[in-house]
Amino acid sequence: MRKLFLLFLLIPFTSFGMEIVWDGSIQHLSIGDKVEILEDPSQSISFEQIISDSLKSEFQPSTNTILSLGYTESHFWLHFVINNNTNDDAVLELAQAGLPIANLYYILNDSISELVKAGYQIPVNNKSFHSSYQVFTLPPGKADCYIRLTTNSEPIPLNLYTEQSFYKKSTSNVLGYGIYLGLMIFVVLYNFFLFISLRRRLFLLYSILVIIYINYSAAVIDGFIVYFLPNVNLLFLYSTIPAIGIVFQTTYCLIFLEARKYVPGVFKIVTGIIIYFAIWVGVKFFLPLPIVLKVNTVHALISFFTMSLVGILVGRKGNKMGYYFAFAYFIYFLLVAAQAIYINTGYPQYIGGLSFVAYATLIEAFLLSFLLSRRFRWERAEIEKEKFEAQQKVIEKTLENEKIIQNQNVQLEKEVTMRTKELQEINEELLTTNDKLIDLNREKDGLMHVVAHDLKSPLSTIINYVDLLKMEGSLDDNQNNYLKTIENVVQDGMYLIEDLLDIHSIESGDSKIRLEEIELEKYMNAWLRTFDKELLNKQQKASLTLNTTINKLTTDPFLLTRVLNNLLSNAIKFSEKQTSIDISVIENKTKVAFIVKDEGPGISSQDQEKMFKLFQKLTARPTDGERSNGLGLSIVKALTDKLGGQIEVNSQPGKGAEFKVLIPKANIHE
């Protein structure tokens, strides 16, 4: 290959096409409309042929910022000239993961460089840049560049970056997708464990639907799957996942909206359409890829139209879930439309490195999850309505009986017998309705059981495996970032579960005082050690001072621990790194005070008025991206009251915050 390259040094070189001047004054430049394109239907043109005079005139200039080469099995050659006037390499990015082959050839300052190979057929770790996209470096000087590629996927943005701006953008993309993946996996696990606990198949079907959404984003649109499966065939997934997803999402629509019950005629028609979609999944393997991709696009439009129509028709028949379902997919359609606009214009730009389709699937996952939970609430409301109507019937029948007694004494026994029978039937309806209410209440308790046991256990397992992977020390920076994202998302879920359990326990009256005698110094030291990891992560120090003569204290250690956990967690979250947190225990004649003081942003007087109410978000925000659900301080107040104590706050904006919990020395009696 080098000898062939050297032969071309003897050929007079004359660059053609628009010259791109790169001086590094901007961080990013789209160059899709500054290149020339030549289609190679035979897939046989070599680099030696492409730089010959006979083919130079056949290149056509591009008019679009983002290259749209269509659904075809042809190869394409791109040509452009770049004059890099800086002393640093420029970074050339083909922002498309679904390219099997993307090879760069360039002639630099009268010398011919080796070609640089990319495309998803080359594992990410073997590329010059570890990116799901196709990325190359262009050295300083004037280079005549040729790119040979195969496509059949989404259009291709062509961008130039400085090295610094590219690494910043690439890191942001990976982090954004890690958060997206963590949220979607949380939705899958949550609904799967609801299915295991409640035996409702809708939860299982919904979990599968969200998994399909994850694969659609990871393999079809954003291409992040190559980080996990380096040798995956993206074009196969690009044609297969949408075909399977269309079958499943349309089927889920019929089941979720109970279309068989509300619109039986439409149900039969849509079932036929689903069968056709399912047959297509098998037939497509025998057809050329360009035809498959076009048919998949048409099927997707049919599926969206069908689901929206079913939702509207079911809504008209009295199932209000239909309108909400249609609205959810309307939002999905808007974001897909934004994706289509970006493909053709390059605007609006992606947010956080994720495509609009990724956000569409994320929003859709949470909207449908919300509708699934609302469905059971509405069913309960319908049962309540039936119970009320039955009670009204009882009242009406009773009044009618009184009138019969007054006006028809002769037929008293006959009428009483008849009405008694009717009342018995109504009473049976009431008993049936009451049984349904008992079942719904049992399901609600089952949900809390899932949260308390079935859901916390797998989340704890995930955290343990993350810790084991960290201890191995063989992970690269990207993998460590993934683990950190997963750990944060799962830990947020654990905190939310504990807070919800506390709220449920307080509101239901299940939170009982269990008095025990504790050794105060031993208890405080053991409790503080449980926060070593969180303090280490933010490089913070917590000091403990015991200014009391009390050796032992009778209280409920579990409730006291929950109070102190929330106060110290808030102090860590809302304080900057490398700050100090002071924890002290003092006493007066009747009470023992537990004090947590931080160097955070402080709390305004307006926030102090509402801070102990449920779901209140204060002005201050966590300093390292931690989550805050607005439950912690309300739980602290409720549990402190349960312990027979009081809580005091001393804080000013910019001067930190001091929380003081006072509980009585004497035994607490309810």
Image (cartoon, rainbow, N blue to C red):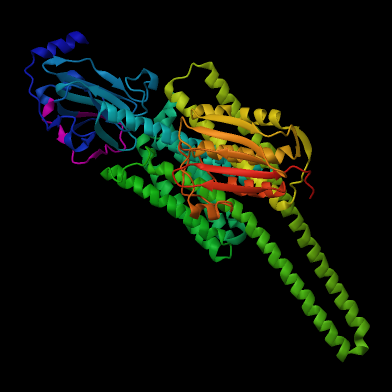
Camera sees residue 175: yes
Q: Residue at x 37, y 25 (%)?
A: 120
Asked whether 554 or 186 is in front, the reply is: 554
Image coords of residue 667 (percent x, y): 79, 43
Asked whether 619 or 140 is in front, the reply is: 619
Residue 39 in the figure: left or right of residue 614: left
Tell me which corner region of the image, top left, top right, bottom left or bottom right, holds residue 75: top left
Q: Residue at x 43, y 50 (%)?
A: 332
Camera sees residue 211: no
Residue 350, above or below 14: below
Asked whether 505 or 553 is in front, the reply is: 553
Q: Quadrant of the N terminus?
A: top left
Q: State yes or no: residue 503 in magenta.
A: no
Residue 132 in the figure: left or right of residue 46: right
- Residue furthest front in the image: 589
Tell me which corner region of the image, top left, top right, bottom left or bottom right, holds residue 661: top right
Tell me which corner region of the image, top left, top right, bottom left or bottom right, holds residue 30: top left
- Residue furthest top in the image: 3
- Residue furthest bottom in the image: 407
Residue 215, above or below 131: below
Image coords of residue 360 (percent x, y): 43, 46
Image coords of residue 286 (percent x, y): 43, 33
Q: Which residues are magenta?
A: 55-78
Residue 88, above or below 252: above
Q: Residue at x 60, y 30 (%)?
A: 544
Q: Residue at x 51, y 41 (%)?
A: 627
Image coords of residue 247 (percent x, y): 51, 44
Q: State yes or no: residue 72 in magenta.
A: yes
